[in-house]
Image (cartoon, coloured by chain):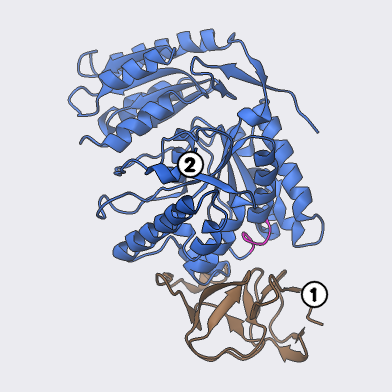
Amino acid sequence: MTDPRLLLLSPEDNILVAREPIPAGESVVVGDHLVTLAARLDRGHKIARQAIGTGEKILKYGAPIGSATQSIAIGESVHIHNIKSDYTATHVIAKPVSEANS
Amino acid sequence: MSIAMRGYPRADGRKGIRNVVAVAYLVECAHHVSREIVASARDGDVHLIGFPGCYPNAYAQQMMEKLCTHPNIGAVLLLSLGCESFNKFSLADIVEKSGRPVHTLTIQNDGGSLKTIKAGQAWVQEQLAVLRDAPTVPMAVEELIIGTVCGGSDGTSGLTGNPAVGRAFDTLVSAGATCIFEETGELIGCEEIMASRAITPELGNELRASVAKAAAYYATLGYGSFAPGNADGGLSTIEEKSMGAYAKSGSSPISGIVKPGTVPPRGGLYLMDVVPDGEVRYGFPNISDTAEIVELIASGSHMTLFVTGRGSVVGSAIAPVIKVCANPDTYRRMEDDMDVDAGRILEGAASLDEVGAEIFELIQSVAAGAQTKSEALGHREFILTYKSFEPAGPACLPS
């Protein structure tokens, strides 16, 4: 039974979405696994529901939302550092420390 | 629950939910004079709109015609410098033929800034006095045209706010109303599931083609319709943002594709194709959320449902904006700007259906005259830039 703070949006998805922020170091149940979060998972952010190989599609709402750029372990954060768009690249700006996590 | 709505009847058969005096500058050089006229009438529904360019543009000309004859508009004051290429004569003629009072002031002919401001202020006050006593008639849900956009999206937008708006859209469409969703650049990745909802296979192909056009356009420009704040909020790719945005459309069949300024011919759900046709010209299709809201209004939207996760604050000239906040943390931080707290769905305090019903009820209250948060705060954003479109093909609006 997966942690109730994590949402599975569609049965075929390989990611889960945080319903609320979960602090770093917390253990969460993902399917049959107990994983410890390496970093804080903010609301609306994703973790892997299963191991995902490089180049594999990320499925959310049952639809592909991009491809893994590296292998991703179960429970690991899934975001712009390890997945990419199959259409146009994602653009972000570097922030000063004071603005981080805003 | 049914709320008694009343509208201002217009000569073309449509009804307005507001009775606004539009003050429209026809080139940036007339912007200040227009702003001064509007600023002197803060207590009335006097809204500033305009087009800054000095070069002619068929899209901008048509947009101004549609906006100045929108059902929420009661009278129009046009502000010209005098040497710009915007065709003020044909615009004034179209507004006059729509049965609305219209007056043109030309700064170069009317004595410069100060005299034009004074003349404009006097004309606006005369119109406000007339509009105050304008008659209203009963208005039904099926007469409403409702647009939707999302902006400042985050990982919660597609979980709460967008699907809740989708529920409200389903209710509106089944009641006979017209609903418009948009931004083909934010439907990239959704083309196949969207095409499967088209009422004809040919329309399905047009839906696919509109998204392919958007993908090619944005690829040429080098950036997708994706802001850094989207990533801060947990969205990783344009396709992920798209899947969340797509949920605003609900689950009704898709009846057609309209381009900005085209009013849907009958009730149902329509996609607005906002990406220009032809080679890439003039820059980004819509430089900000407001450009999309203005296009929805030009296609007849009486109001716009705006879903935000990070927290947008914009309203709009001409037509009210209902702000649906998808993220409960944002709602707590920016409650004064938000009309609907959809984020409480994530906290287990409401269901999607309940928030969808709340939005449907709020639409009727706003149509009946209740002010939205952005209206009360005086948000009346407006933007209009250069674009070019070709007419939509026959498959876009199946009869």
Q: To which residue does mark 1 refer?
A: A4
Label 2: few (<14), some (14–19) or many (≥20) C-alpha neighbours in 10 Å: some
Work out which residue is located at the far left of the displayed protein and give it.
B83
Rendering coords of residue A76 (x, y %): 62, 86
- Image vertical order of residue A99 relative to residue B107, above or below: below
Rendering coords of residue A21 (x, y %): 70, 72
Chain under callout 1: A
Q: SS class of the residue under badge 2?
A: loop
Q: Is residue B334 visible?
A: no
Describe residue B107's horizontal placement relative to residue B211 as left or right.
Answer: left
Rendering coords of residue B9 (x, y %): 57, 16
Q: Does the segment drawn in magenta span residue B94?
A: no
Q: Picture quarter containing residue B76?
A: top left
Q: To which residue does mark 2 refer?
A: B398
Label 1: few (<14), some (14–19) or many (≥20) C-alpha neighbours in 10 Å: few
Nearest the eye: B251 or B96: B251
Amino acid type shown at disc 1: Pro
- Image vertical order of residue B210 relative to residue A66, above or below: above
Q: Colour of chain A?
A: brown
Describe residue B98's horizontal placement relative to residue B243 as left or right.
Answer: left
Q: Colour of chain B?
A: blue
Q: Which residues are magenta?
A: B156-160
Q: CA distance from mark 1 to mark 2?
A: 45 Å
